[in-house]
Image (cartoon, rainbow, N blue to C red):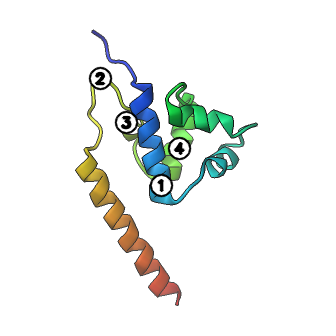
Amino acid sequence: MYPMIDKQRTGQRLRYLMELKGLEPRDVQEYLSLACVQTVYRWLEGSNVPSVDHLYALSVLFGVPLDDLLAGNRDWGRTPRDYALIRRAYMYSQKLLEKSVA
């Protein structure tokens, strides 16, 4: 069997990364200059996946490699524990930024 993208799990990853950044679907819509927010909701529910161009832009927005956005039957992406560590590091960096600005 050849590698395939799991749309449901990819949508779950996108949702999780959006939560980490504190982004709403409308924020992603505006960032990508999409005509309507429904496109983002379709990605999150797993009925569609973003185009390659949108995946590339999302990887920049979230600061993760493309492989970490996609989930498939060949899952070489990060584990939930890895994402927990990333979240902790991100929150810590935000606190450091707040202190340096003050």
Number of the label disc, if any, that sits on residue 19: 1
- List the residue tagged with mark 2: 73
Q: How packed is label 1: few (under 14 Cα within 10 Å), some, or many (20 or more)? A: few
Choose the circle earlier in sequence order: 3 or 1: 1
Q: Residue furthest right?
A: 35
Choose the circle earlier in sequence order: 3 or 4: 4
Report, in whole angstroms, how far the alpha carbon at label 1 lies from the one at label 4.
14 Å
Number of the label disc, if any, that sits on residue 58: 4
- Is label 3 in a helix, a strand or a loop? helix
Report, in whole angstroms, how far the alpha carbon at label 3 lies from the one at label 2.
12 Å
- List the residue tagged with mark 3: 67
Image: 97 above or below 54: below
Residue drawn 48% across the image and 82% down it? 98
Whole-percent x and y of residue 21? 49, 58
Q: How packed is label 4: few (under 14 Cα within 10 Å), some, or many (20 or more)? A: many
Residue drawn 76% across the image and 37% down it? 35
Q: Can you tell which of label 1 and label 4 is closer to the viewer?
A: 1
At label 2, the amino acid type is Asn
Whole-percent x and y of residue 14? 47, 42
Q: How packed is label 2: few (under 14 Cα within 10 Å), some, or many (20 or more)? A: few
- The image quarter containing residue 72 is top left
Q: Is residue 24 left or right of residue 75?
A: right
Whole-percent x and y of residue 28? 62, 47
**Quadrant (top left, top right, bottom left, bottom right) of the N terminus:** top left
